[in-house]
Amino acid sequence: MAKQETTAALDQTEAKKNPNQETVPLDSPIQRGEQTINEVLVRKPMAGELRGVSLQDLLQMDVLALRRVLPRITIPTLTENEISRMDPADLTQLGVAVTGFLVQKRFKEEASLTA
């Protein structure tokens, strides 16, 4: 019975997942003073938050484009300096999250990228 309850709880969690945000766990946590950042919440950017950045550069996960946009859409807010010193694997995962928000839902469903 406990297994069924756990499964039901997981199903409810999945159903409540916000499609406009994604939590990215970091392989190499960021140290900010006394605070250690182990995961970053990336939220879907609005058009104004993409100002000064080419969508093509973002879709190609260009480092300079990510350094410009990520401080605008991350919680906790990452600085450009923190992003510059980030583990490349973590930056790639953040870039995947950002590019995922730039694709329309119907294309994600067609490609089976959504559950």
Image (cartoon, rainbow, N blue to C red):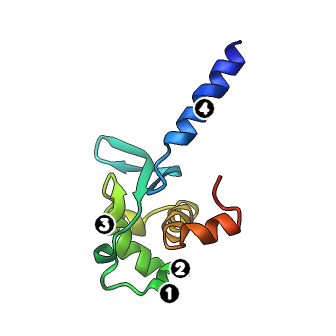
Find residue 10 and name its label.
4
Between circles 4 and 1, the one closer to the viewer is: 4
Find residue 59 and name its label.
2
Counting residues from the N terminus, which is met first, the one under dot 2 or under dot 4? 4
* Amino acid residing under circle 4: Leu
For marks 3 and 1, give the CA distance. 18 Å
Residue at 30% across / 82% down in the picture? 51
Residue 109: percent from the left, percent from the top? 65, 64
Find residue 14 and name its label.
none
Circle 1 residues within 10 Å: few <14, some 14–19, many ≥20: few
**Residue named by callout 1:** 56
Residue 54: percent from the left, percent from the top? 42, 87
Classify mark 4: helix, strand or loop. Answer: helix
**Residue named by callout 3:** 72
Q: Pick the quarter of the image with the N terminus.
A: top right
Residue at 53% across / 59% down in the picture? 90
Q: Is residue 35 above or below residue 67?
A: above
Counting residues from the N terminus, which is met first, the one under dot 4 or under dot 1? 4
- Quarter of the image where one finds residue 53: bottom left
Q: Are marks 3 and 2 in contact (CB under 8 Å)?
A: no
50 sits to left or right of 108? left
Counting residues from the N terminus, which is met first, the one under dot 4 or under dot 3? 4
Classify mark 2: helix, strand or loop. Answer: helix
Residue found at the far top of this picture: 1
For marks 2 and 4, give the CA distance. 31 Å
* Amino acid residing under circle 3: Arg
